[in-house]
Image (cartoon, coloured by chain):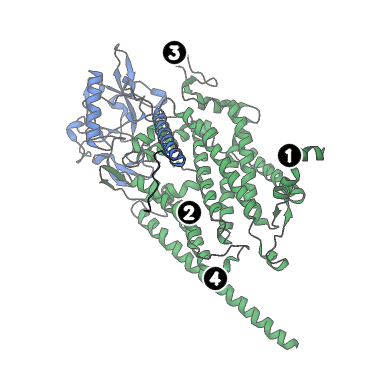
Chain colours: A blue, B green
């Protein structure tokens, strides 16, 4: 007599149940994950959410004067907040405040005070300069510092120097505020180009370049 | 009727198992109860608030200040409904009661946790309940944060902006996670409905489930016994039963406590939505989170700026300060029961001075939390002239490590002193005992 292992031609009940349970668990998990995908809505780039683009007029953002074009005489070494205002498809004015990251900070310094690394050819006469007003750290709106020179973010004490390209002078922000090229057309301040560097909330230049292309295609 | 009920529901078994549960007689054992009562009041006031709240960030005309026909004054519906709640009879007080209760619940939970830690009540067999308690703390904080976003005033707006940025700072998946969690790019059209869902359904559900588990395990494992129980009846459960002795005490405590917080709510204003105004691009100067998140805020305020790429993901100061650092702190707290190597079941609450290292480590930990919280006041410290912009970070970083170290050794020293005195007392007593012979 030889000892042999009994070969059961049929699958055992235990094995069947285990495989069935495993399969349903896998299918169930995958279906749940796909349902989770619905949590993330599609982003549609509408004119009010587009970033400042060439030709946009800069208008006041403060509640009392919202929508009024900014005049040179309104500006000083105190921060003035502005929205870019462009046109929608029908040619109506649209303030681009659908994306709060479009808020801008405008300054006017006496000649000679604006120095490198500010891009001087992107300013008006080396006097008026525009930056993104969104802190590159956690996305709060940045104010004039209450402790003397420069700008300070109220959220985590990030500090910037608007006279030197808004470079970080204190706190956790990783990058300077993005400078926005502007020019004077008649009485109005007008956007000359996209932000010179990537603004908040972009994390890499490639992403920002991709977004710029998307914007150009959409608004063309 | 008792018989009738008992035949159907087996009340007598319930009575033996749960209703006769012995509660230790010591005031420090009420801290958990206070946390529980806060949760109950929070749910009741929360339901009342939800009845009048409109979870939407769509713009509506502000009925209190409609503006003109050509230029209507538009505010988010959620903000508008918060104004309307304030205008209801006792509406403002209801909001404050909910807010104060939330703060006090976290405070009671923290002190409860300190009691557990310092008396060694986290030891075997109660590790699981320590971990559930930690989860309760974390989810309570999340619930509170989603709660103060709901009025959608400028403060809430800035808060949710920072929370969104912190979520988006997770390497690799941050953008996707933030958009999924907050209904699209900030501020999505559905951000308030989404957070409302979290605050009134998801998070309270989690809190209630965890609270249920916390208490069931506590009833199964019994409380740690206070020291007097050791002298009274060694290894026996000493205390008063839930029915009938503990219940009236609990009721009195719950009512007195609620009354006290009610007084608070009546006279101490909190989160004035009218003052902050609707969401705007004008930042609020010196905005701060609630006290129990101030240490994270402080860490973010003094962390230096850095950024590096790792396998295509971006790791920045924000991720490290707001997620990695709190993750480490929470991890250490989770690991507390694992530092204890004893294999025996813990019956009695320990005298903290008998465990100087544990005591000192706990005090040092709290000292560090306090220093980091103070660091959250960096702008105020600079404005007050105590620090300068140039030296603030350095000094605060040094204090972050020096103060805990000093408190650690100070506690060890004080405990040694107490022990020396105690031993001297014992020697004294012994000497006198001999003299009495």
Camera-side residue of B152 and A193 = B152
Horizontal and vertical percent position of residue B347: 62, 62
Q: Which residue is mark 3?
A: B70
* Of the two numbered discs 1 and 2 in the rendering, the one whose residue sits closer to the viewer: 1
Disc 1 from disc 2: Cα separation: 39 Å
Camera-side residue of B282 and A12 = A12
Q: Which residue is mark 4?
A: B414
Disc 2 from disc 3: Cα separation: 58 Å
Tag 1's secondary structure? helix
Q: Is residue B199 left or right of residue B165?
A: right
Q: Within 10 angstroms of label 1, few (less than 14), some, or many (20 or more) residues? A: few
Camera-side residue of B355 and B46 = B355
Q: Within 10 angstroms of label 3, few (less than 14), some, or many (20 or more) residues? A: few
The quadrant in which residue A122 appears is top left
Labels 1 and 2 share a subunit = yes
Tag 4's secondary structure? helix
Labels 2 and 3 share a subunit = yes
**Residue drawn 70% across the image and 60% down it:** B237
Tag 3's secondary structure? loop
Q: Which residue is mark 2?
A: B334
Q: Chain of mark 1?
A: B
């Amino acid at each position: 007599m030889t000892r042999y292992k009994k070969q059961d031609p049929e699958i055992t009940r235990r094995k069947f149940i285990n495989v069935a349970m495993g399969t349903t668990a896998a299918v169930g998990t995958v279906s749940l994950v796909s349902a989770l995908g619905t949590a993330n809505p599609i982003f549609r780039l509408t004119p009010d959410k587009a970033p400042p683009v060439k030709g946009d007029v800069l208008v006041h953002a403060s509640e009392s004067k919202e929508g009024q074009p900014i005049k040179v005489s309104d500006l000083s070494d105190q921060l003035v907040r502005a929205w870019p205002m462009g046109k929608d498809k029908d040619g109506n004015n649209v303030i681009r405040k659908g994306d709060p990251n479009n808020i801008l900070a405008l300054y006017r310094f006496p000649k000679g005070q604006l120095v490198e690394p500010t891009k001087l050819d992107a300013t008006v006469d080396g006097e008026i300069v525009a930056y993104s007003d969104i802190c590159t750290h956690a996305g709060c709106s940045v104010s004039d510092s209450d402790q003397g020179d420069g700008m300070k973010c109220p959220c985590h004490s990030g500090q910037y120097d608007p006279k030197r390209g808004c470079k970080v002078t204190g706190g956790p922000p990783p990058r300077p505020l993005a400078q926005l090229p502007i020019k004077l057309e008649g009485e109005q301040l007008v956007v000359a180009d996209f932000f010179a560097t990537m603004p908040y909330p972009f994390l890499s230049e490639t992403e920002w370049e991709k977004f710029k292309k998307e914007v150009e295609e959409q608004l063309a | 009727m008792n018989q009738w009920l008992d035949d159907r529901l087996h009340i007598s078994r319930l009575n033996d198992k749960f209703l006769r549960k012995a509660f230790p007689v010591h005031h420090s054992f009420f801290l958990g109860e206070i946390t529980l009562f806060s949760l109950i009041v929070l749910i009741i006031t929360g339901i009342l608030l939800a009845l009048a709240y409109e979870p939407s960030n769509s713009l509506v005309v502000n009925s209190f200040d409609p503006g003109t026909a050509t230029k209507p004054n538009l505010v988010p519906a959620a903000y508008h409904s918060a104004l309307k709640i304030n205008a209801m009879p006792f509406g403002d007080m209801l909001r404050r009661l909910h807010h104060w209760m939330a703060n006090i619940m976290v405070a009671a939970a923290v002190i409860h946790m300190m009691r557990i830690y310092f008396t060694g009540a986290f030891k075997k067999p109660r590790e699981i309940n320590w971990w559930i308690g930690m989860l309760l703390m974390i989810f309570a904080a999340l619930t509170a944060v989603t709660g103060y976003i709901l009025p959608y005033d400028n403060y809430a707006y800035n808060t949710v902006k920072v929370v969104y940025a912190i979520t988006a700072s997770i390497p690799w998946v941050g953008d996707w996670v933030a958009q999924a969690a907050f209904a699209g790019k900030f501020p999505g059209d559905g951000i308030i409905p989404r957070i409302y869902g979290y605050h009134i359904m998801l998070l309270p559900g989690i809190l209630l489930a965890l609270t249920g588990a916390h208490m069931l395990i506590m009833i199964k494992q019994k409380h740690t016994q206070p020291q007097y129980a050791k002298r009274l009846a060694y290894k026996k459960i000493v205390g008063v039963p839930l029915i009938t002795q503990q219940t009236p005490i609990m009721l009195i405590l719950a009512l007195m406590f609620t009354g006290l917080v009610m007084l608070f709510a009546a006279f101490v204003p909190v989160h004035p939505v009218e003052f902050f105004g609707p969401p705007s691009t004008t930042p609020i100067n010196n905005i701060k989170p609630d006290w129990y998140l101030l240490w994270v805020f402080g860490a973010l305020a003094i962390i230096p700026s850095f950024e590096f790429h790792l396998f295509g993901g971006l790791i920045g100061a924000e991720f490290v300060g707001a997620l990695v650092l709190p993750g480490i702190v929470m991890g250490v707290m989770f690991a507390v029961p694992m530092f204890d190597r004893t294999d025996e079941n813990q019956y009695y609450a320990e005298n903290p001075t008998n465990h100087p290292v544990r005591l000192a480590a706990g005090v040092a930990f709290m000292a560090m939390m306090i220093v980091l919280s103070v660091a959250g006041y960096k702008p105020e410290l600079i404005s007050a002239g105590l620090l300068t912009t140039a030296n603030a970070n350095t000094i605060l970083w040094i204090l972050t490590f020096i103060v805990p170290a000093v408190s650690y050794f100070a506690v060890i020293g004080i405990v040694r002193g107490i022990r020396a005195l105690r031993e001297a007392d014992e020697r004294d007593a012994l000497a006198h005992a001999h003299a009495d012979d």
